[in-house]
Amino acid sequence: MTIALTHLQRLEAESIHIFREVAAAFAKPVMLYSVGKDSSVLMHLAMKAFYPAKPPFPFLHVDTTWKFREMIAFRDQMAQKLGFDLLVHVNEDGVRDNINPFDHGSNTHTHVMKTVALRQALDKYGFDAAFGGARRDEEKSRAKERIFSFRNAQHVWDPKNQRPEMWKIFNTRIASGESIRVFPLSNWTELDIWQYILQENIPIVPLYLAKERPVVERDGMLILRDDERMKLRPGETVENRLVRFRTLGCYPLTGAIESDADTLEAIVGEMLTARTSERQGRLIDRDEAGSMEKKKREGYF
Amino acid sequence: MRHIMAKSLAPTDGVRDYLAAQEKKSLLRFLTCGSVDDGKSTLIGRLLSDTKQIFEDQLAALERDSRKHGTTGDDIDFALLVDGLEAEREQGITIDVAYRFFATPKRKFIVADTPGHEQYTRNMATGASTADLAIVLIDARQGVLPQTRRHSIIASLLGIRHIVLAVNKIDLVGFDQAIFERITEAYGQFSRDLGFQTIVPIPMSARYGDNVTGRSDSMEWYSGPTLIEHLETVSVEEAVVELPFRFPVQYVNRPNLDFRGFAGTIASGSVAPGDEVVVAKSGKSSRVKRIVSYGGDLAQAAAGQAVTLVLDDEVEISRGNMLVSPAARPQVADQFAANIVWFDEHALLPGRSYILRTETDQSSATVTDLKYRINVNDFAHEAAKSLEMNEVGICNISTRTPIAFDPFAENRTTGAFILIDRISNATVGAGMILHSLRRAENIHWQSLDVGKRVRADMKNQRPAVFWFTGLSGSGKSTIANLFEKKLFATGRHTYILDGDNVRHGLNRDLGFTDADRVENIRRVAEVARLMADAGLIVIVSFISPFSAERRMARELMADGEFIEVFVDTPFEECARRDPKGLYARALNGEIKNFTGVDSPYEAPEKPEIHLKTLGKSAEQMVDALEHWLNERDIAEDQYDNGGGI
């Protein structure tokens, strides 16, 4: 008898194995849910890993208060549909200081509303393991990170001194206050993600599909004006254009691409001919060289 | 960077067809290894670039970085594509393994780019542990180097059976066939006994692309495959589906009283509802009732799939156990021999207690015998008392509880383990099991009618091990002797194990290296355990400087029987007292490895009893000890009377 697993079956099995390992070995895991396509896949895999039970951990959304409105609506809808335990954390200090991407720049905004907010939430609930949807094909420093990635009590990643990670035998031991970030999608590529969404019919935020949307051209990017908080600069106009998003984050920091791909198949078709990487639409990666590594060392996912 | 208008290329059917074709592709996981500067990262950059895996924005960033950090003049430095950490780019070296993904029309690939520096061998091993093939790079100008050999040995130990010998930088030796053949010959000689199934030598220039994806115009004499041709076609499939069924239980899924499923990843073989399975550790058998999955029950499942099994009967199984084929069972033992690759800067010491972790099981473990170390240059088996970082050796290992396993040569999943340091939680070593040791299978613990309790009751006492630790000259022996006198006077049965005395007899073969100190403590702890088993109150008076060994001793004893007594006298005071004149000699350099001088003392963090001796008399210390012992015995008697039926 020969049963050869397909490429996606292999990836799926590996991710499920990782989910179960964390559930078995940690006292208080959490899944970071960012509402994007990778999070959608992650959530789907978590449902599979523990079926017929529900995932034995809550889902945490770190809300920067600058997410697309459609993302928030989608998030609440999924939580209700799948019945998982959704925690939402906002850095109230940042809200009080009115930290925003327009006045403070992407760096400060991301640091305060995302990295610091995440650390606050992890400390508040005392989570000892946190799942994230990062993939190794996304970015150079992520390509170097372990699946089980150790953080000290200050949430700091030490890239020069990672634990060896042999076979599928994961070292899940930590001292009190320390934690592990876990990346079940480490070995998936962007194409794998879309292929899996297509195969499994996984719901995604409609922003990934092309539609006429009100956008502003700014700093070489097409920014969707999602609410009135985005003030127009002199000479800027809002135009309705046929656009979609390859990745989703804070709306002022996420560039749209012009596209007529309004089905999943069309998205995959478009990807196959793409000449730029998905993070190209992310302002935060371009602030300075090695910026992702720096953010990760500080506790960003 | 501009936002771009992407054309949706294909009609829906085209995409579906394309994806269906993608699904049929097989996956090859390989690593690049070899010595520093042999061009590993450059080769991967070349592969990614030639297979069109680099996007425009990444290429633009690469060009920027090449000007800033690059080592290739005006050309693009492909190494910067994989050396993703800042420290790596600054130093121009690879520190940790990077995983990259690419595909050709024939196959998908995950490649691990691993560091060449000896210092980072553990990161190379990390990349090798999940690979099926290794590209061993050799700089044509240098030939086979010690790191080439070390990496080849580690690859072999980790079960890699397919090698590509990439003789790189061939352009720098004028595309010389004789040099290529000499290197191929030398590597063939060296690797004869490493058990590789295929070794394919390819002359290439990663920087210019010769024989990587395209055939070289400069080497008419070479008629073999290009690298990519070989990677696309080499067959590495190991028929794990054909092996006996092995299912390490990872997680027991019990959402309610009506459902009890055993979740895990099938390590080998296959399973279907109705199949008989055996619980490896207990030998109990049952049948598979259902294979539960999110999309509905499955009719069968095979190696590599992550499933949930429901059995016919309520058998006792928890995480760490294994469901197996009744016809071919794994070994279950607490003593076995294994190859070990050591990762940590603190050497492996026989006798020290580590945590052994298999895919789902865990136990305390000690290396009982380091049989030999393997010299990576000539495979010589060398006698060794410890295994230093990046060394490879063969050891006997003893675990606290039996584990279920297969020899690694038969099953890469059920034959592997890692070792974890008990205090730092670092992953300090990786092991590949060779075979169980017969004595573990044949010597069963005798269950005796006359037990510890009976022996102790006859003496009218509870057994205890008072473990005195502290610097030389701290007053351990003085306090211990006085304590024993007092106990004796109250009718207790006691014995003192004193560091100096034991070293004259039982441990006279041991010196003062770290390895010998660990063995010294291990033997004494075992003797103390036997004496406690005989019902005695044992007083151990040993410097015992390492917390790991004291913890090992603690774990040997029954709960509550190990009482760590920290005789806390400051170094200056010990050196001032210097009853045997040792400090003076150690400070003069006449005695080596002297605790507190040139060998560390790790003070206990939470001793049961902390004796601060400064300004106090030995009598006061002994009173404190006696008080503690009486309190414990009273508490235990109350517990016994209250809880006894």
Image (cartoon, coloured by chain):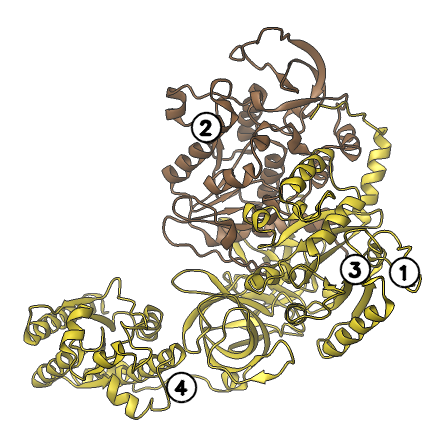
Chain colours: A brown, B yellow
- Quadrant containing the N terminus of chain A is bottom right
Distance between the alpha carbons at the discs numbered 1 and 2: 58 Å
- Label 4 sits on a secondary structure element that is loop
Residue B219: mark in rendering: 1
Q: Is residue B641 above or below residue B189?
A: above
Q: Report x, y in % for residue B180.
A: 82, 68
Q: Report x, y in % for residue B29.
A: 71, 56
Distance between the alpha carbons at the discs numbered 2 and 3: 53 Å
Residue B446: mark in rendering: 4
Q: Give the residue type that dot 1 points to.
A: Met
Measuring 69% from the left and 53% from the top, which residue is drawn there?
A: B41
* Residue located beneath label 3 in the image: B172
Q: Give the residue type that dot 2 points to.
A: Met
Q: Is residue B385 above or below residue A220?
A: below
Distance between the alpha carbons at the discs numbered 4 and 3: 70 Å
Distance between the alpha carbons at the discs numbered 1 and 4: 72 Å
Measuring 42% from the left and 33% from the top, which residue is drawn there?
A: A116
Is disc 2 on the same chain as disc 1? no
Q: Quadrant of residue A263?
A: top right
Left or right side of B365 for A276: right
Q: Give the residue type that dot 3 points to.
A: Leu
